[in-house]
Amino acid sequence: MTVLLREIRRSPLLWLLVFVPVVFVAARLRPHSHTMLFVLSVLAIVPLAALLSHATESVAAKTGDAAGGLLNATLGNLTELVIALTALAAGQIMLVKASIAGAIVTNTLFMMGASFLLGGLRHHVQEFNRIGARMQSGLLFLATIALLVPSALATADASSAAFTRKLSVGLAVLLIAAYALGLLFSLKTHRELFASAEHAKDDEEPWPLKLALATLAAVTVLVALVSEIFVESVQAAAEAFGMTPAFVGFIVVSLVGAAAEMASAFSAAHKDRLDLSVGIALGSASQIALFVAPALVLTSWFIGPAPMDLQFWPGAVVMMIIATLTAVFVTNGGRSAWFVGVLLLMVYLIFAMTLYLMPPR
């Protein structure tokens, strides 16, 4: 606990933790002040994300970057899973689908692109394990195929809703099985292939493992609670700021939901630990596509007013496919520089600009 308090005292960003209790009090006293709650929730999530970053790096120092990246992606996606389950129970299936597609694109393009840019500005050329990146990109490509099929059949053949739902359940089971086998391959049977590339030694002493794990668990719960307030206020606040619903679901919700993972990925890239950054970005995207989305399809049969399927609108499918192919292209060589990050961010900004200017339907 002394280590944690010392870290908070010396980091001005963590002083924003004062907004965590403030946003809970404001949500109880002023539940209809959506714009205020939106701003307070963002201010509360930022320091929580920074705290999660420190804890994740300490765990990765003990377990290795591959396992550390997986742990961070899993805990970060728990927040998005809680948000999606809440929206699913309320029958907001389109919002759930928008957040899924947006999270895949945001993690693949924005998180990895910003990591390449921030790391490249400090280090001339950075290296990472391209085998691990290829595997995550391959899993992500598999998931985009599974998401493309129901959408393509529904558009071309006018398939019935019952067929689409049955197909979605079968695809969900296959994707979860593929994700489990991928974990077995990378963490058990062929773990030697996923060793981290060499990087500079970090002078900062990692936290004790018990403290890091306890911090990860506690901060993840707080991020989930604050994110719920954020989601409840974001639609009304978006209207005040002139944002379209498509932009909110695909961009804003995804960026805030992935704030904790981004803090860890950006910090690792700055310290020349690009394996951890790539593992968080691609690992989170593939986990959402291969586990979170299928789990939501299966869960919707029990908690939602109507079952959810894997049929996405054509624009979302195109963006996910482009993001996946871009990730495959830029990670093929196992090396990166700042301009590679710029290219990824430009693709993401093209999508964001399109959604911001798109008129609501």
Image (cartoon, rainbow, N blue to C red):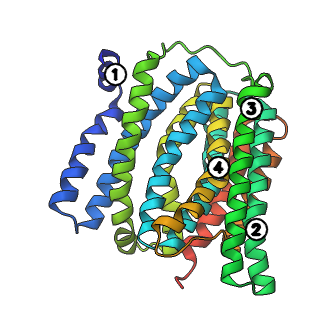
Residue 1 figure quarter: top left
Residue 272 visible in image: no
| Crowd rating for badge 3 (residues with CA inside 10 Å; few <14, some 14–19, many 20+) | many
**210 left or right of 284 in image:** left
Residue 266 in percent (x, y) is at: 56, 36
- For residue 285, which numbered disc appears in the image? 4
Q: Nearer the viewer, residue 76 or 13?
A: 76
Marks 1 and 3 close (CB-CB < 8 Å): no
Q: Label 1, on which residue?
A: 4
Q: What residue appears at the point 22 percent right and 69 percent down from the top-left corner?
A: 32
Q: Label 3, on which residue?
A: 186
Q: Label 2, on which residue?
A: 148
Q: Is residue 66 above or below residue 344?
A: above
Q: What residue appears at the point 41 percent right and 34 percent down from the top-left corner?
A: 217
Q: Secondary structure at mark 3?
A: helix
Q: CA distance from mark 4 to mark 2?
A: 16 Å
Residue 181 in percent (x, y) is at: 75, 40
Q: Secondary structure at mark 1?
A: helix
Which of the two discs, 4 and 1, labels the residue nearer the N terminus?
Answer: 1
Marks 2 and 3 close (CB-CB < 8 Å): no
Mark 3: amino acid: Ser
Nearer mark to the viewer, of 1 and 2: 2
